[in-house]
Amino acid sequence: MSAEVLDVVIADDSGLYRQMLQNVMARIPGTRVVGVARDGVEAVEMVTRLRPRLLTLDVNMPNMDGIAVLGELARRGSGTRVVMVSSLTAAGTPVTVEALLHGAFDVVAKPAGLDPHEVRRVIHADLVEKVATLRASLAAGREPQGPAPAAPPAMSPAASPAAASRFAALAVGASTGGPEALREVLPRLPADLPVPVLVVQHIPAAFSAALAARLDALSPLSVVEAGDGMPVERGRVYIAPGGRHLRVERAGTGVRCRLDDGPPVMGCRPSFDVLLESATTAFDGRVVAAVLTGMGSDGLAGCRALKARGGGVVAQHRDGCTVWGMPKAVEQAGLADAVVRLGDVAGLLTTTLR
């Protein structure tokens, strides 16, 4: 895979950024810029004609903005992956989150207040990482495909004598492609879901509050960004803040969120492993973990600890994963009670948790 050249189209209404991105891509081995677009209409035309592996896409552009470009590419069935190159401004954050919810592969921030050389250095480092993730995703997509999984039965609750008659919490973990997966799963969970939902999504700190707000608008459940000391209540969804670990702990007869700035775990903060290990203790193993699309193996150790206490694990099937990494790790370790396509995740969880 490393020898394959990735064709790239750059779309930005800023001439300065168009030139900068061309210079940056020229310094990333194995990438080749095959088109440069000044607006969304040109971007769609070039992607359709040139079929690049990657499109770097500005959010705010004339004629057709980045969100409309994503929609049009989806309508045309384009397989090109899209990385949004966006400013981290308060006004731009919601629309960038909207792009992630509608299938953007990832986001690169346009830094503010830095000299041009530093801006180029930061963007280069970010894009090197995104290109590596894209290569891993493409490589996984060429692995032999297994048969579609059969629809599994609902999982049984923990058999511990201390366990109640049902699971007490749902924990969801995702990384690359996760916002789009969360948009599919969370709005399909019922308003009367009898357990709290704890979510770790690997996302920059500037975007997590906007992600929670947008998912709240889409979902029958209340969705909030978790705060330190916030009580964990049934029928509510708690999104881990970007850049901070989310744990839960017993507080009297209830459970509360705890946030900390401890070191990343396997490169991740927030870490799904950290959340799962604390939830396993706080809820006496009566937790279902849903492992969605994402790079790496965050969640593997946490699912292992959870299974040892009688918890349940659902993994997203590789078909439809942006990156089959996190679900693959738990599936291949034999920890998944069920492996289901994304469109079936919410239904299985609802049946299991009622």
Image (cartoon, grey):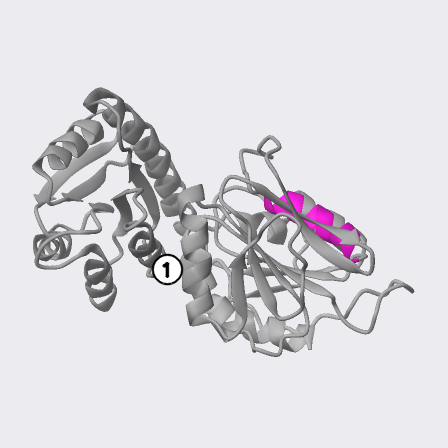
- Against 144, is 270 above or below? above
Examine the rendering and report whether any part of residue 15 can be seen. yes
Query: Does the magenta-highlighted stretch encompass residue 10?
Result: no
Which quadrant holds residue 14?
Answer: top left
**What amino acid is found at the position of numbered circle 1 in the picture?**
Leu
Judged left or right of residue 160, residue 276 is: left
Residue at which label 1 appears: 101
Judged left or right of residue 2, residue 16 is: left
Q: Main secondary structure of the magenta part?
A: helix
Which quadrant holds residue 21?
Answer: top left
Residue at the location (35% across, 54% down)?
97
User: Can you say which quadrant of the picture contains the C terminus?
Assistant: bottom right
From the top left corner, tell me how far across and down residue 315 is, in percent.
Answer: 58, 59
- The region drawn magenta spans 271-283
Disc 1 packing (10 Å; few <14; some 14–19; many ≥20):
many
- Against 303, is 244 above or below? above
Q: Nearer the viewer, residue 251 or 238?
A: 251
From the top left corner, tell me how far across and down residue 148 is, in percent.
Answer: 51, 68
Residue at the location (39% across, 40% down)?
133
From the top left corner, tell me how far across and down residue 227 is, in percent.
Answer: 58, 50
- Against 43, is 161 above or below? below
Examine the rendering and report whether any part of residue 143 can be seen. no
Residue at the location (62% across, 71% down)?
235
Which quadrant holds residue 155?
Answer: bottom right
User: Can you say which quadrant of the picture contains the N terminus?
Assistant: top left
Secondary structure under tag 1 reads helix
Judged left or right of residue 269, residue 93 is: left
From the top left corner, tell me how far across and down residue 139 is, in percent.
Answer: 39, 44
Q: Nearer the viewer, residue 31 or 148?
A: 31
**Furthest residue in direction right, as rendered:** 161
